[in-house]
Image (spheres, coloured by chain):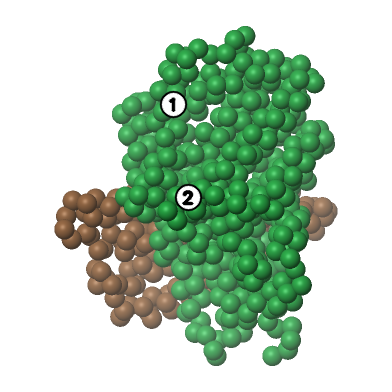
Chain colours: A brown, B green
Amino acid sequence: MSNTQIRSGIWARILGWPLEETIGGVALVITIGSVLWGVLTRYLFPQPAAWSYEIATIGFAWLVFFGAAAGVRYRLHSDIDVLVGSFSPRWQYRFAVFNFWLLALFFGSLCVFFIMHVADAHKSLTIALNLPRSTIYVPVCLATALMLLRHVEAWFQRGDSDAALHEANIT
Amino acid sequence: MSSLSPWLPSILMFVLFAARTPITWAMAIPALLFFILNRNDVPLSTFAQEMLEGTQSISLLALPFFVLAGAIMNAAGITRRLLNVAEVLVGHMTGALAQMCVVLATMLGGLTASSNADAAILSKTIGLEMSKHGYSRAFAAVITSSSSIIAALIPPSIGLIIYGYLTETSVGRLFAGGVVPGLLLAAGLMTMTYFVAVRRGYKAQRKVRASGKEVRTALLDGFWAISIPVVILMGTRYGIFTTTESGAVVVVYTLIIGMLIYRTVTWKTMPGILREAVLDTSAVMIMICAASAFGFYLAWEQVPQQMAQGLSGQWHPLALLLTINVLLIVIGTAIEGSSALIILTPILLPLIQKAGIDPVHFGIVMVANLTIAGVTPPVGGMMYIASRVLNVPMREYAIEILPFLLMMFGLLVFLSAFPAVTLWLPNLLYNS
């Protein structure tokens, strides 16, 4: 096996690993756990845990953005195909190409905006835990970068047929 | 700035919808355009902040919890137990399997929180069973998809949580407001089913009514699942926990039921359940995030207020509500329910506020309407799910659903005309 084949095999394994869902799942468990802890401490202790909702909303943000990146990967984001669906396959392909570039540009911009936001928010602290707000935004940056990566990946793995293009919902 | 500029992002959004850009990004891209055009007035990083806005909402935190609870209950095999309950309750009626489908949907509505999830469960279980027992496949698809609408009204409901967030309305009141309309819809579907079943000779499942002992055994077996809406309503009513916290409590409750009582959920099945919950939650939530950014533009340019000024002054509240109903049905056939709810609520809210319509009343009518649109041809999520599972051509489905649609439109008019039907329970629970 050549070095190129080994390298491409490693990359395929890395890209194939369900990173987005794993992070999203862990974030969901943390979110639930912290809300429950907030309820419990309200009844069990004189001082309820003030940080529980802060952790929950941080976990929620990660869950949503990493889950959305998985949505890009598995083409789960719904669209309205009433008009374009009635066009010829050639025109449908043109719309797909238009949407590919539009979304690639958008995901790239979104990532840049979040990087700007990380820089802006680093010095400001969260209310209960005094964490830099960038702890919320850095993983979200990573999630938006993953959206771009998965979007490009989905395009190159779409296959050649028109049906694959439609099924892939790569738009 | 030209007079067209305030409308430019809105126009672009509809162009992108038409160009088959995914709905989420078709809202986010025009919002980004607005921030770029107005970068001298609004810092560009506000766009990122607005995209994150929805995830910082305490009321929306309930959404992943109820989605996860639904996924756990589904994996716990609760459908079979609830089917037994439905069988002993209505198995003796004409068209028993169809009647059982409606009763099952009413009970499932309190667990899954999602009409699409219910449509999939019902068509794969009782829908296939109906076709084996001589029911027409089209009728089976119609009754399974129509019954799924009930899930949007019986608490917990994802649509009502989203509406509550978008309009800053109490989710507890919305949950209570959905109960009576949900039960009315169930009664309407059962009545229609009865007439169809008598005409076509669809049989009962059992010759005689179930005995008291049979009913008791089935109810005890399904008790844990059936009690979930009661846990939510009572827990929030008596201030034991908030609506959001009730979601987390219900997750633990369903885990205990699945792992310790029914013993059908294991640690091994949990990653799959979590994955399903993450994907389902984020698909809706990222849309809300995009809508938050788009909502910033709408608020900045006062687009809904301009529309309200142009419209509501000349309208009677009922006439306005009925017109909105027609509009929603038309839009709902082209856009998926949650998406339509997220896009249209900020636009319609100033209109209904100006007309003096109660936001809880409007929320129930709107969510019911957009969910009904999900079974209305030519485009409808629940229609697609049920038709695909039961292999029904759209033309047959469209003919079969007509009488059911007429009944549901009648119910919408009734709910619109009589707000007390919706508001009775929330007023009773939360105003006392």
Q: Closer to the camera, A80 or B292?
A: B292
- For this orientation, the residue located farthest to the left is A46
Residue B340 image offset from top left, x and y in percent: 65, 58
Seen from the viewer's position, the closer of residues B57 and B209 is B209
- Please determine if labels 1 and 2 lie on a single subunit: yes
Q: Give percent across and percent down for residue B77.
A: 46, 27
CA neighbours of label 1 inside 10 A, class few (<14), some (14 to 19), many (20+): many
**Residue type (three-letter) at the residue carrying disc 2:** Leu
Residue B340, placed above or below residue B383: below
Quarter of the image for residue A136 reads bottom left
Position of B137 with respect to B70 (left or right) is right
Q: Which residue is tagged 2?
A: B428
Q: Which mark is residue B423?
A: none
Residue at 60% in and 25% down? B100
Residue drawn where x is 59% and y is 18% of the image? B91
Crowdedness of circle 2 by 10 Å Cα count: few (<14), some, many (20+)? few
* In this rendering, position of residue B235 left or right of residue B36: left
Q: Is residue B157 visible to us here?
A: no
Q: Picture coordinates of residue B151 (x, y %)?
A: 56, 41
- The mark nearer the N terminus, 1 or 2, is 1
Where residue A116 sits, quadrant-wise, is bottom left
Which of the pair B329/B336 is nearer the observer? B329
The three-letter amino acid code for the residue at tag 1 is Gly
Residue that carries the numbered disc 1 in the rendered image: B222
Q: Chain of mark 1?
A: B
Identify the residue at the far top of this view: B207
